[in-house]
C-alpha cells in the first residue's frame, strides 16, 4: 500500500498549538486594525484640518474591519471541526 493512501485513511488530528496561535493573533489583528484606522484618520485630520472627524471615522472603520476579520476567523475555525 503506498504511503499516501495510509496517511489519507488516518483521522485528522487538531494541533493544539495552531488553535492557540489563532486565538493569540485575534487580539493583535483587532488592535492593529483599530490602530491603523485611527492613525490614518488622525494623519488626514492633521493634513486637512478636520480634527477630530476623520480620526473618529478611521476608528470606526478600523473597528469594523477588525471585527469582520475576527468573524472570518471564527467561521474558518468552525469549518475545521
Image (spheres, rainbow, N blue to C red):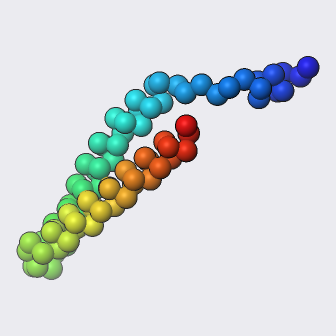
Q: Is residue 15 above or below residue 77?
A: above
Q: Residue at x 55, y 37 (%)?
A: 81
Residue 61 point in image, percent of width and height: 27, 67
Judged left or right of residue 78, residue 52 is: left
In this picture, residue 76 sits left or right of residue 42: right
Question: Which residue sits at x=48%, y=42%?
Answer: 77
Q: Who is closer to the viewer here, 46 or 75?
A: 75
- Quadrant location of the N terminus? top right
Nearer to the camera, 36 or 1: 1
Q: Position of residue 19 (x, y in %)?
A: 44, 32
Q: Quadrant of residue 46?
A: bottom left
Q: What residue sits 72% from the left and 23% below the top?
A: 10
Spot occupied by residue 23 in the image (x, y as percentages of width and height): 37, 36
Q: How many marks?
A: 0
Judging depth in this view, the residue of 75 and 57 nearest the camera is 75
Residue 43 seen in the current view: no
Q: Is residue 81 above or below residue 76?
A: above
Q: Is residue 62 left or right of residue 80?
A: left
Task: Examine the rendering and report whether any part of residue 71 can be seen.
Answer: yes
Q: Residue furthest right?
A: 1
Q: Give the image quarter of residue 56.
A: bottom left
> Which residue corresponds to the image point at 24% horizontal and 56% vertical from the top-left?
34
Residue 44 location in percent, x, y? 19, 72
Amino acid at each position: 500500500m503506498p504511503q499516501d493512501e495510509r496517511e489519507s485513511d488516518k483521522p485528522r488530528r487538531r494541533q493544539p498549538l495552531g488553535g492557540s496561535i489563532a486565538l493569540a493573533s485575534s487580539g493583535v489583528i483587532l488592535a492593529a486594525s483599530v490602530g491603523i484606522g485611527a492613525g490614518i484618520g488622525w494623519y488626514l485630520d492633521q493634513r486637512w484640518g478636520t480634527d477630530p472627524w476623520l480620526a473618529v471615522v478611521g476608528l470606526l472603520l478600523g473597528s469594523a474591519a477588525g471585527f469582520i476579520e475576527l468573524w472570518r476567523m471564527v467561521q474558518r475555525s468552525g469549518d475545521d471541526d
